Amino acid sequence: MDTENGIFAAIALPVALSFIMASLGLALTPADFKRVVVVPRGVAIGLGNLLLISPLLAFAVAELYGLAAAFAVGLVLLGASPGGTMANLLTHLARGNTALSITMTALSSVAAVLTVPLFLTLATDHFGADELAEDVEMVPIVVRVFLITVVPLAIGMLIRDRAPAWTAAHEQQAKRAALGMFLLVVVGAVVEGWGEATEHLGELAAAAITLNVLAMGVSFAIARLARLDDPSSTAIAMELGIHNATLAIAIGATVATELTIPAAVYSAFMFVTAGLFARVMAVRNARTAPPGHPLPEPA
C-alpha cells in the first residue's frame, strides 16, 4: 500500500465514516432499537434480506459477470454492508415505512461488526483472492468496523439524549455535512483507482446495476410474499438498494484499492435506480393508503 493510499485509508476514510455514523446516531432513539420487539416480523424479514440475501446476491452477480477476484470480493463487501442513511430519506419520499427503515439501518449497522468481516473473509476464500488473504484477518476487521461504526453511532445517540435542543438545531446541518463527506469519499475512491475503474468500468457498472435492481426486486418480492404491506416492503427494498458504501470503501481501502472500486461505481448508479423505484412506489403507496390514515407527504 503506497503512502497516498495509506493516508486516504488510515485518516480520511475513518474520519468521514465516523462523522456519517455519528450523524445517524443524532437521529436515533432507543425506541428505534426496541421496534424489533414491537414489530418483529417486519424487522426480521428486513434484516434477513440485508444480512443474508444481499451478500448472497452479490456472490451470484460477481460469478455471473466473471469479475476479477479483487472486484468480486469488493462487490460482496458492498453487498454485505448495512443500509445507508439515504435509504431512510428515499423511503420517506416513497411514502414507505420510514420508522422500519430507520430501525433496519440502526440494527444492520451494529450487526455489520460481524457480518462485514465474515462475508469479506468468505469472499476472499471463495474467489481465490490469495493476494488479499494476508490482509483479511477477522479480528482486526471486527475491531475496525466497531470503532468506526458502533462507537460514533453511540456517541451521536448520547449527544441527542444529553443535548436535545442542540441536536434539534444542528441535526439537518450534520446530515448535509454527512452527505458532502459521502460524496468526497466516493470521489476519493474513484481517483485512487482511476486506472482500474476506467479499464473495467463497463463490467463493473453492469454488475453494480444488476445487483442494485436484483436486491430491490427480490427483497420487495420476499416482503410481499411474507404479507407485509407496501410501505414496509418499500422500506425493505430501499435498505437493500442504498447501502452504506462509505463503510465498504473504508474497509476495502485498508486491504487493497481494487476492493473500493465496486462500491464507488455502485454509488454512482444506486440513487438513479432507487430514485426511480421511490417515484413509482410513492404513487402506489399513496393509492393504497388506508382510508382515514393518509401517508405523509414527502418533504
Image (cartoon, rainbow, N blue to C red):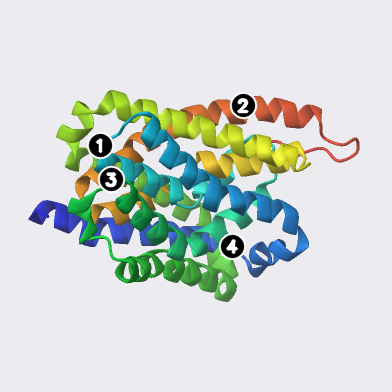
Type of the residue with mark 4 = Leu
Q: Tell which residue pokes out farthest to the left in this image.
A: 3
Query: Which tag, 3 or 1, sits closer to the chain's start?
Result: 1
| Distance Cα–Cα, label 2 vs label 1 | 35 Å
Residue at the bottom extreme of this rendering: 162
Query: Is the residue marked by circle 2 packed among few (<14), some (14-19), or many (20+) residues within 10 Å?
Result: some
Amino acid type assigned to the residue bearing label 2 in the image:
Arg
Q: Earlier in the sequence, mark 3 or mark 2?
A: 3
Identity of the amino acid at label 1?
A: Ala
Q: Which residue is mark 4?
A: 28
Q: Which residue is mark 1?
A: 68
The residue that appears at 64% across and 69% down in the rendered structure is 30
Q: CA distance from mark 4 to mark 3?
A: 28 Å
Q: In the structure shown, which secondary structural element does the residue marked by tag 2 occupy?
A: helix
Q: Is residue 93 above or below residue 203?
A: below
CB-based contact (under 8 Å), mark 3 and mark 1 = no
The tag earlier along the polypeptide, 2 or 1, is 1
Residue 279, disc: 2
Residue contact between numbered discs 3 and 2, judged by CB atoms under 8 Å: no
